[in-house]
Image (cartoon, helix red, strand yellow):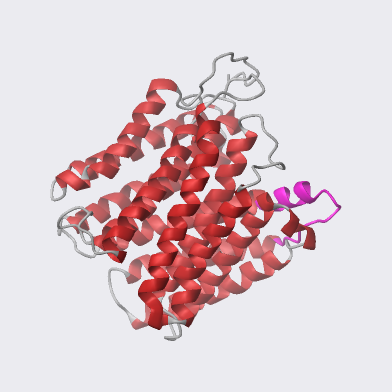
Amino acid sequence: MLNIETPFTGKFAFLHTGFRPFFALATLGSALLMLLWLGSFGLGMPVLPKDYPPITWHAHEMIFGFGLAVVSGFLLTAVRNWTNLPTLTGYPLLALAVIWLLARVLPFFAIGGAWPALAELLFLIVLLVALTRPVVRVKQWNQMAIVGKVALFIPASLVFHLGVARVWPEGIGVGLYAGFYLILGLVLTLIRRVVPMFIENGLNNGFVTRNDPRVDRWSLVLFLALAIADVWLQSRHDAVLLVLVSVLAGLLAILHAWRLAGWVHPDVWKKPMIWVLVVAYGWLVLGFLLKALAGAGWASHSLAVHALAAGGIGMVTLGMMARVSLGHTGRNVNAPPRVLPVVFALAALAAACRVVGVWLLPAYYAHWILLGQALWVLAFSLFALLFLPIWVKARIDGRRG
């Protein structure tokens, strides 16, 4: 069993816990990946892998690169806490991080070959084993639903790479949307599990969030149906499926808007570690709404995806990485670095440029994209400057972890 009270007198602890290397990789990787995308899309520079469609590379790296790095860091840490058993540490953790890095670098040298796909597959298999073993050992079967979502990244990745290899061209869209909905499903699960508690404990003023088991059940059923329909839509363009996707997204927008309205209190806006998650949830509601409107031709599917991804997932990851990093290094999550709200605001502005600006003033499309990319890079670069010392150095309370 894991003894979290074990003292540690060293200065550095970068490989003690999964969140440390993987939050660092996610943050630095996100800034660098977006910088490369800015150079390619915004400035026309030949900086991306040859013969790799730029938009395909961008989508894949934000899902299977950035997104999976955050998921890995969070789950390696969460499973350790749930089971009281160690997950990867030390050199095995370093090896997993190196495999993730190889999967990012290999497309620049080996596109057309199998090496990028094999590196990504190896990463996913090792991660899955590392998460599954402690859960099975203590028989926490209720956590297997989350671990199961990680397992589903394997077929999503394989299908995507079959598309890149032109074995099944539709596999690119199917794999990307499958990976996207897996990330989104994990985010929604996380939001429902912890955000009400964070709000009530953080405000500490007697406010009780409003929740309804019926909303929980129906939002899960409708989301599963939306994910299946939208992934299926990538392999066959069907008018009925398009209408179904729009209807399901509209219903999800209504349910999540109702839930979010019951979580908001005026004091939320005084707490950066809380409002970042509330704003992120608002972006998810907007994303589902735009998805519904896209079916009627009143918005584009790209706007919906970026509201969900850049706004919702992007801000949730910043908020949760900050909370986990502070809490698991012995710091007070209610007293974050003073600059952190600026980082959150920059991320929100980046999403607003990419979604709202493009939607309302499409004549300036290229300008909005370029500005959104620059703000994203700035937000994640500042986040890295704030948290790299925290990730590298030992806990401030003298414990191991």
Left or right of residue 258: residue 93: left
- Considering every residue shown, the one lying at the far right of the view is 206
Relative to the observer, which residue lies in front, 284 or 30?
A: 30
Q: Quadrant of the N terminus?
A: top right
What residue is at 46 percent from the left and 34 percent from the top? 131
Residue 334: image quadrant is top right
Relative to 24, residue 366 above or below: below
From this viewpoint, is residue 393 visible?
yes
Relative to the observer, which residue lies in front, 141 or 338?
A: 338
Left or right of residue 306: residue 64: left
What residue is at 59 percent from the left and 13 percent from the top? 9
From this viewpoint, is residue 135 visible?
no
Q: Is residue 352 magenta?
A: no
Q: Quadrant of the C terminus?
A: top right
Residue interval drawn in magenta: 195-212
Relative to the observer, which residue lies in front, 62 or 4?
A: 62
Relative to 229, residue 68 above or below: above
What residue is at 64 percent from the left and 50 percent from the top? 193
What residue is at 58 percent from the left and 37 percent from the top? 325
Percent position of residue 399, x then y: 63, 20
Q: Is residue 209 magenta?
A: yes
Percent position of residue 75, x then y: 51, 39
Relative to 220, residue 340 above or below: above
Percent position of residue 385, x then y: 50, 40
Total tally of numbered discs in the picture: 0
Residue 242: image quadrant is bottom left
Relative to the observer, which residue lies in front, 9 or 79?
A: 9
Left or right of residue 368: residue 390: right
Percent position of residue 218, x then y: 60, 66
